[in-house]
Image: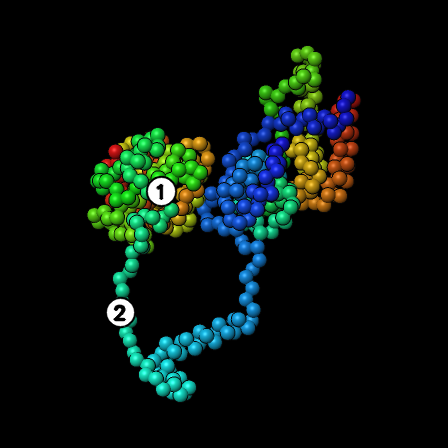
Amino acid sequence: MPEIEDRLTALAGAIAWPDTPRLSLAVGRPIAVEPRRAFFVPRWAMAAAAVLVIVASLLAYAPTRTAIADWVNLHIGLSHTTALPTPSPLPSGTLGSNLGLGTRTTLAGAQSQVTWHIVVPGQLGSPDAVYLLLPPDGASGGEVSLVYATSPGIPVSTETGVALLVTEARGSVNEQFFQKTLNDATTIEPVTVNGHQGWWISGQPHNFVFIDAAGNPRFETLRLATNTLVIDDGGTIVRIEGHMTRAQALQIAGTLA
Amino acid sequence: MEGRPTDEAELVARAQRGDQGAFEEIVQRYQQVAFRVAYVITGSAAEAEDAAQEGMFKAYRALHTFRTGAEPRPWLLRIVANEARNRARSAGRRQHLQLQLAEDFRPGDAAPSPEAAALAADEQRRLLALVNALDDDDRLVVTSRYLLQLSVEETSAALGIPEGTVKSRLSRALERLRQKVEEAQRA
């Protein structure tokens, strides 16, 4: 009879363990590695900063500014200017170039690089810009983004200069897994678009996770961080992001072809 | 047992610099052992999944505390096991885990005939029943060290006890198990 230790070791390979779940960092909260060392601000620097803030506040107020000028015997004229409001500037550069969508291309150029059929919302017509993100930065099989500068009834984001963003990649959505990525300020509602399963995500979603064509989870940042409609269009995961209502999103998605 | 590739240190270093993909790779490598450790502690697959998932999350956020050059596996197991223990404690009960033999288990080449194989399988089944019947402390240390094949360091991390305690507790647990085996054979 072998020793008890040997028998236990042999037993290790015979245990019926439950199936191991796929673990991931995709849980509903922002994650960040904490810094190695807390940023230390010396007391003298804090005191100096406080003095600067006080002085700056006093200088910003015209009567005290004049008094200070008199006190330091500064015999120069301090003229008052009124700052004119300027319109919110749109981001500079090519449309969508600041969103990390990959390389700019054309619809035909993108189609030649991916194996699936890129769907375009007929209601919106041809996109104003097309981007292609290939692995390893993009999902397995590539990721195509269609950027629309304007869309009737949908406001343009002042931060991105984009009205609507349609992103496509091959993969699948695990609803339970995906729900975990959403924060409390976000609601999710299952929808159906042309017989395809979809999810209307309203509020302030920031992250999206799906399983790409190679079976790997992809953690993506929603570029516009606003209402988003996700559709599983026969294995192509289509995301439509924009400041749109649910009805507008469903109407646009209904014209995908 | 999952492998420990030599690029592990590089993966950890990348993760510490904020590379989430690198940490995902570490998670994929150790998710099985982490989940099983949590399963042994909580006695529930659902609780174990939650504990392992939450533990991985906490590990990611605590990467700054990881000591450069250390083995990430015991460190990860410690965090996941802590999470599992907290969950088991807050649930107010610890489900007494009854491990089972895999249905398709065959003793393999060591058995010279089908009859001998059946006999060996039966012996394994009875041995597992005796392990299941050990008290919690004994069962956890035996299961961790032999059935999960953790090192002494990893067992210490998983059970939250010093390595010296692992060795002494294991020694006593094996002695008690040996006695039970002998009693069962005489019966």
Amino acid type at image mark 1: Thr
At mark 2, the secondary structure is loop
Q: Which residue occupies 28% across, 76% down? A: A81
Quarter where residue A62 is shown: bottom left
- Looking at the image, which residue is at 58% across and 43% down? B10
Q: Position of residue A202 (x, y in %)?
A: 34, 47
Relative height, residue A33 to residue A87 (above, below): above
**Dot 1 alpha-carbon crowd within 10 angstroms: few under 14, some 14 to 19, many 20 or more:** some
Image marks 2 and 1: residues in contact by CB distance under 8 Å? no
> Which numbered marker is on residue A84?
2
Q: Residue at x 66, y 43 (%)?
A: B157
> Residue B161 at what x, y percent from top left?
70, 45
**Picture quadrant where residue A88 is located:** bottom left
Residue B42, horizontal then vertical, whole percent: 60, 39
Q: Nearer the viewer, mark 2 or mark 1?
A: 1
Amino acid, disc 2: Leu
Image mark 2: chain: A
Identify the residue under disc 1: A103
Viewport quadrant of the N terminus of chain B: top right
Badge 1 marks a residue whose secondary structure is strand
